[in-house]
Amino acid sequence: MKTKLITLSLLFLIFSAQAQTSSFAYRRMLKGVDSAGWYGISLPNGVIQNCQTDFADLRIFQIAGADTTEAPYLLKVQVPIVTEVNEQLNAFNLAKKDGKQYLSFELKKDQFVNEIDLSFLEENYDGVVTVAGSEDQKDWFEVDRQRIISIHNENMQFTSAKLSFSKVHYRFIRLELACDRPLTFQSASFKNQLIEPGVFSLPALTWNTTHLKSKGQTVVSIDLKEYQLINYFSVVMNESNDFYRAFRLGRLIDSTKTQKGWEFFYDELASGYITSFTANEFNFGYAPAQKLRLTIYNGDNLPIDIQSMVVRSPQVKLTTRMKNEGTSFLYYGNERLAAPQYDLVVFKDKIPAPKKNLEIANEEKLLAEAVKPSALIENQIWLWGILGVVIAVLGYFTLKMMKTK
């Protein structure tokens, strides 16, 4: 009787372990665990393509015989993190000389600045701002010189009056405005931006351009080599004259075949203006994509050719604490699974740096094998049915033993 009970218990443990991992479509073996401790795992694009977009279905299991242990992890999408100190300062010594306007500002002690966001009452202006710094308002040192512009009409509302430069530390800042019209100063926001750079790759891409003259649009189909996360897009236009064009950037999320052919559906990633006035760089929340569509609205203007484009793909990193036992796997591919709730998320600042990164093996397809008629044990319905029988038998023998005693 004891032998039967032990056998049934082992079967229950085996079935429980299989139930823990049977709902996933894919897994990859993790190699390199040589001792207990913290390890890093960099997700390849193949994982990103087959897991949930928010990574909720990622699980790390260590399997040793009939024992399956889930290893908690901390996930980080390594996009740039920007923090800033923002201070509104009042202008003094407002003056005009030789058609130029001057604004002076006194910074607080130990205040660093690398961006000034200006606001003026007027619209439709075009000018150049020279930024200078001083400790005593006698000796001035030029920091940078940048263009500001505002265009407001029935087709466009565009203003660029933000000055970005290398970080400076002066007691006083003076702005010299050379503009095509007098400007009425409203406000100036002085910022010190601290940027923690992300970890990213620059995926290879190709594109095909179509000019739709009847719609006044240029449509650019962009193909990435792999399905991957992206969070940044920049474009350089092949045009020497000033220009500004509205645009939308979308990623392909679905398609359907109709009587008129294939219809494609895109989710918007970014929109705004591509102009000759500023660098055309656009950051957005990270999203998985392989096919993109850039639509440029030309209106009655001639199309502009694209010289180059760049997208960035942030790295996704897992940090996990592993035991030095059994075989380790990363499981994924379960649309119904909710994100795990791990304690270490609360204490992430106390997690030490990983001792090394684990090697992640090629992808194994799991559910594809489950459809074979002979592999009934891999089907969830059969699995849970057998588990129910095992539990019932265990309960029966347990009660019988108790009555015998």
Image (cartoon, helix red, strand yellow):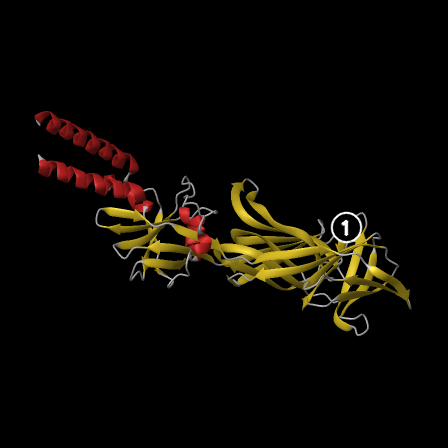
Quadrant of the image occupied by residue 276: bottom right
Image location of residue 81, percent across then percent down = 56, 57
Graded by Cα atoms within 10 Å as few (under 14), some (14 to 19) or many (20 or more), the crowding at tag 1 reads: few
Image location of residue 347, percent across then percent down = 44, 51
Most extreme residue toward the front is: 109
Question: How many circles with numbers are drawn on the protein?
Answer: 1
State the residue in front, 130 or 250: 130
> Quick check: 121 left or right of 196?
right
In the rendered view, tell whether residue 382 sits above or below residue 48.
above
Where, quadrant-wise, is the N terminus in this rendering? top left
Quadrant of the image occupied by residue 372: top left
Most extreme residue toward the right is: 98
Three-letter amino acid code of the residue under disc 1:
Gln
Question: What's the residue at 90%, 67% (across, down)?
Answer: 97
Question: What's the residue at 29%, 46% (across, down)?
Answer: 369
Q: Secondary structure beneath disc 1?
A: strand
Residue 80 seen in the current view: yes
Residue at mark 1: 157
Question: What's the residue at 18%, 41% (across, down)?
Answer: 10
In the rendered view, tell whether residue 21 sits above or below residue 86.
above
> Quick check: 108 left or right of 202?
right
Question: What's the residue at 39%, 51% (across, down)?
Answer: 73
Residue 297 seen in the current view: no
Where, quadrant-wise, is the C terminus in this rendering? top left
Image location of residue 353, percent across then percent down = 42, 61
State the residue in front, 102 or 136: 136
State the residue in front, 205 or 316: 316
State the residue in front, 188 or 221: 188
Image location of residue 392, percent across then percent down = 20, 29
